[in-house]
Amino acid sequence: MSKRCELTGAGPLAGANVSHSNRHTRRRWEPNLKRKRVFIPEENRWMRVRVTAGTLKTLTRKGLKSVEKMRARIVRSNPSLKIPA
């Protein structure tokens, strides 16, 4: 399974650890993924999704429609990004 949010497409980021002596070693920052059940009122069913904690917070506060709009905006700004539907 890829480490990618199913709703926003957020994935791992890359960078460097920088020590006190200024040595650089490569590392990855993994997204904080959680597996949750989300109720979809339009379809009257539950759906299991893997989402980041930040997306889950937005989902709880603003609802699924807001997250879908956010996802559409991400896809529009970067059409080459492949976000699962």
Image (spheres, rainbow, N blue to C red):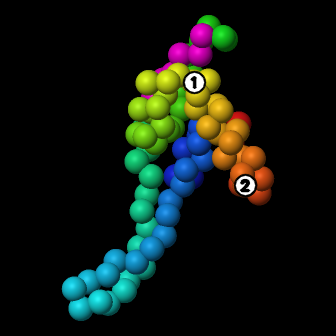
Decide if residue 1 is in sight here: no
Pick the residue in front: 83 or 54.
Answer: 54
The relative height of residue 56 versus residue 14 in the rendered view (above or below) is above
Residue type pointed to by label 1: Leu
Secondary element at image label 2: loop
Residue 47 horizontal side relative to residue 76, left or right: left
Q: Is the magenta region chiefly helix, strand or loop?
A: strand
Decide if residue 41 is in sight here: yes
Identify the disc placed on residue 37: none
Residue 49 horizontal side relative to residue 15, left or right: right
- Measuring from the top left, give residue 65's x and y in whole percent: 61, 24
Q: Residue furthest top?
A: 44
Quadrant of the rendered image containing residue 46: top right
Does the magenta segment cover residue 37?
Answer: yes
Which residue: 72% across, 52% down?
77
Pick the residue in front: 64 or 36.
Answer: 64
- Measuring from the top left, give residue 26's x and y in whole percent: 42, 79
- Measuring from the top left, give residue 21's x and y in whole percent: 24, 91
> What span is in magenta?
36-41
Q: Residues within 10 Å of mark 2 (few under 14, many from 20)?
A: few
Which residue: 75% across, 47% down?
76
Which residue: 53% across, 27% down?
48
Secondary element at image label 1: helix
- Name the residue beneath numbered marker 2: 78
CA–CA distance in space, label 1 to label 2: 21 Å
Identify the disc placed on residue 64: 1
Residue 68 horizontal side relative to residue 10, left or right: right
Residue type pointed to by label 2: Asn
